[in-house]
Image (cartoon, rainbow, N blue to C red):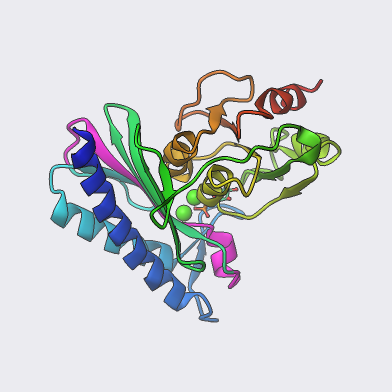
Amino acid sequence: MGPGEVLSYIGAAGDIAIKAGDVLLGGLYNKDKIVEFKGDINLVTEMDRRAEELIKNHLSDRFPDIAMLAEEGGESGDFSGRRWIVDPLDGTTSYAHGLPHFSVSIALEEDGEVIAGVVYNPCADECFSAVRGGGASLNGQKINVSGTSILKRSLLATGFPYDRATSKDNNVDNFNAFILKAQGIRRMGSAALDLCYTAAGRFDGYWEMKLSPWDSAAGSVILEEAGGRISDFSGGPYSIYGKELLVSNRLIHDEMITVLNGN
Ligand code: IPD
Ligand code: CA
Ligand code: CA
């Protein structure tokens, strides 16, 4: 697919993400949200499903040849190398509590590589997007990672897996190590926005474990196109299907790897 074509695809996906985001925003302060539990603490609201339905209908009408992997409905369509990877509501826990920080995330994958992504935050009316090789933008303005060069002056983001109470591999040790070494840490509750905020220089670095492909697909290309570095916890290649995510403005990446490896 040529760059112009990808740009038009992701432009259309951005319009659809904004539509879905506006529907979610409309239900944010509804006190009677219907909440179901997928596990002990992993929940889903009727709005996750409604937003996903809207995205799926619009994308399949407009792009009938592109398959889809979406959080709530799984795989759909005939896969021929390209697919949309969709998180209709990233930040469901915040959303269910009426906390205005969540996003809609749509990525386009071709032959196993994420080639474009869009993440929309309806609460701030901020739309982050990128096409691989074409830079990253926020509401049409180019964005770049920060220039903070040491961990001590860095504001970091992280998150904790849903199995944190039952698994020892729960990120608490990493959090304890970073909280003593960084300027500060935020747990905002939307991995897609954590990636985009790092891309926009609001965070200097972000790490998380046990994410799903739809959490990081769109944000990962936005981060890379904004000049950031992405890897696993050892500095090896990152995969949206892998279990470790480390991103930074590049400058503090090695320091973060050292902390994650217990030195
Ligand atoms: C979650 C958010 C959160 C992260 C969790 C994700 P969801 O996605 O991205 O920040 O810490 O691991 O599962 O469930 O709200 O779509
Ligand atoms: Ca998610
Ligand atoms: Ca979700």
How far across and how far down the image is residue 16, in percent?
A: 29, 60
Query: For the point 62% across and 49% down, which residue is it?
Result: 202
Query: Would you say residue 88 sits in the magenta stretch?
Result: yes
Q: Is residue 235 magenta?
A: no
In the image: residue 32, left or right of residue 250: left
Left or right of 48, for residue 229: right
Asked whether residue 213 is in view, the answer is no
Q: Quadrant of residue 147?
A: top right
- Between 67 and 116, which is closer to the camera in this rendering? 116
Magenta part of the chain? 78-99
Q: Is residue 124 above or below residue 39?
A: below
How far from the left and from the top, in percent, is residue 187? 68, 52
- Residue closest to the eye, 227 or 100: 227
The residue shown at (70%, 41%) is 166
Residue lying at 20% horizontally and 40% vertically, measured from the top left: 4
- Whether residue 198 sits left or right of residue 25 in the image: it is right
With 127 as the anchor, is 167 left or right in this view?
Answer: right
Image coords of residue 91 (percent x, y): 54, 57
